[in-house]
Image (spheres, helix red, strand yellow):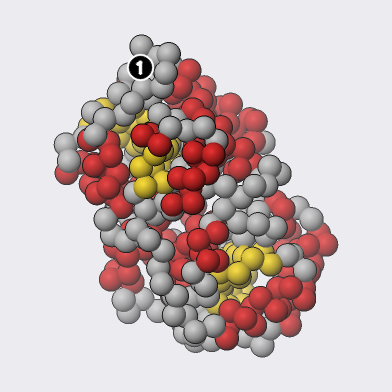
């Protein structure tokens, strides 16, 4: 099978890390198309280096823009690529704009779409990622799901069970395969912090950063914690932080984004994590660090079910309470089902079974 794997942003790179060597070992002619949705070194290149991912065969240079601009430019570039390369199938990953663009471009050319991390739902249509998930899944011929609840979401939306394959969480496999590589990696000390004695923060979603009152509430919660706060800031977020009071004077160390391995080490060594990232919710669950998710909801409900995560509103008191609960937690949760080191192997097995073309397509 000739397969083009579409990636565009940090979460995608992490997920294809364990997958690409598994596809190669199984004899698939698989190549990466990088849309360039995340395009600078700190958000793109460093992940390919850290994860030892093969260089993308194609870099499309889409860059930033509104959701429509970014999706449209990626769709146009991918359509041209798919027409020239005529793959047997296209794999899209996760829920970013590149995922939607890949699914739209491939399906309009009658190329089967395989969705890795299918079926996750937050139930919140104000999230651009929720729209991307819903549309990509309706266009996909094969759905590779990370949790059993994702299977049920797809069935409820009319997807045939024969198209659904519960393979597990590929993000979890990436964490497990890299834990040995971060042994002895003391990133916290480089920032003047002690392992187990700081809170790690990632806040970047527009639902938080584009609302000054929410960002100010988050800042007030950080100022109230007795532990120092380390905040590797997303490029679009950093200019907004100082105006909200997220500064070193308030006990928050704002630093540039870090590579995957350094971030994994920081998550492992933190006392707790505060985030609005889907991927960080999963990674914290795997490394055993309790997480507080500052969002209205989460599509990673399984992390809450097992006790690794709690979802709180962007309100100072709610964040303080959630953080207190996280810091007091026993860290004894069980990893979710099939969040293991065999996910890529299950993906390969599903692909080897053949991709069933959507009805009406010759």
What residue is shown at x 34% (from left), y 49% (from top)? Answer: 167
Instruction: Give the residue at mark 1.
Output: 84
Q: Is residue 171 above or below residue 91?
A: below
Q: Quadrant of residue 72?
A: top right
Looking at the rendered structure, the number of numbered marks drawn on it comes to 1
Horizontal side of residue 88 vs 91, given as left or right: left
Q: Is residue 72 in view?
A: yes
- Quadrant containing the C terminus in the rendered view: top left
What residue is shown at x 65% (from left), y 83% (from top)? Answer: 324
Horizontal side of residue 144 vs 39, given as left or right: left
Q: Position of residue 275 (x, y in %)?
A: 60, 65
Q: Is residue 284 above or below residue 7?
A: below
Compare residues 30 and 327 and report the one nearer the observer.
Answer: 327
What residue is shown at x 34% (from left), y 31% (from top)? Answer: 4
Compare residues 299 and 279 and report the one nearer the observer.
Answer: 299
Compare residues 52 and 168 and report the one nearer the observer.
Answer: 168
Q: Is residue 188 in view?
A: no
Q: Position of residue 173 (x, y in %)?
A: 33, 58
Q: Is residue 110 above or below residue 299?
A: above
Where disc 1 sits, the SS reads: helix
- Quadrant containing the N terminus in the rendered view: top left
What residue is shown at x 79% (from left), y 55% (from top)? Answer: 211
Q: Position of residue 217 (x, y in %)?
A: 78, 69
């Amino acid at each position: 099978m000739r397969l083009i794997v579409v990636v565009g942003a940090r979460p995608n790179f992490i997920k294809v890390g364990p997958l690409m060597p598994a596809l190669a070992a199984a004899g698939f002619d698989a190549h990466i198309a990088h849309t360039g949705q995340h395009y600078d070194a700190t958000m793109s290149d460093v992940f390919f280096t850290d994860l030892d991912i093969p260089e993308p065969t194609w870099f499309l240079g889409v860059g930033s823009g509104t959701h429509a601009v970014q999706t449209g430019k990626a769709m146009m570039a991918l359509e041209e690529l798919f027409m020239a390369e005529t793959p047997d199938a296209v794999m899209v990953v996760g829920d970013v704009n590149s995922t939607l663009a890949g699914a739209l471009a491939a399906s309009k050319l009658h190329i089967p779409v395989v969705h890795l991390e299918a079926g996750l739902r937050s139930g919140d249509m104000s999230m651009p990622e929720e729209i991307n998930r819903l549309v990509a899944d309706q266009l996909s011929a094969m759905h590779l799901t990370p949790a059993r609840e994702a299977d049920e979401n797809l069935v409820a939306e009319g997807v045939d069970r024969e198209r659904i394959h519960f393979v597990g969480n590929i993000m979890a496999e990436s964490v497990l395969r890299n834990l040995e590589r971060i042994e002895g990696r003391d990133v916290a000390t480089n920032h003047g912090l002690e392992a187990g004695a700081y809170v790690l923060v990632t806040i970047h979603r527009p639902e938080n950063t584009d609302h000054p009152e929410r960002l100010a509430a988050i800042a007030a919660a950080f100022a109230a914690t007795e532990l120092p706060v380390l905040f590797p800031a997303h490029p679009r977020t950093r200019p907004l932080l100082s105006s909200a009071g997220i500064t070193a004077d308030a006990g928050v160390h704002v630093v540039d984004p870090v590579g995957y391995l350094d971030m994994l080490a920081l998550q492992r060594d933190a006392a707790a994590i505060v985030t609005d990232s889907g991927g960080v919710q999963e990674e914290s669950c795997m490394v055993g660090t309790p997480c507080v998710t500052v969002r209205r909801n989460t599509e990673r409900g399984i992390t809450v079910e097992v006790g690794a995560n709690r979802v709180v509103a962007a309100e100072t008191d709610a964040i303080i309470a959630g953080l207190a609960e996280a810091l007091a937690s026993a860290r004894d949760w069980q990893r979710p089902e099939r969040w293991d080191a065999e996910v890529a192997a299950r993906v390969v097995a599903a692909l080897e079974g053949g991709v069933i073309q959507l009805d009406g397509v010759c």
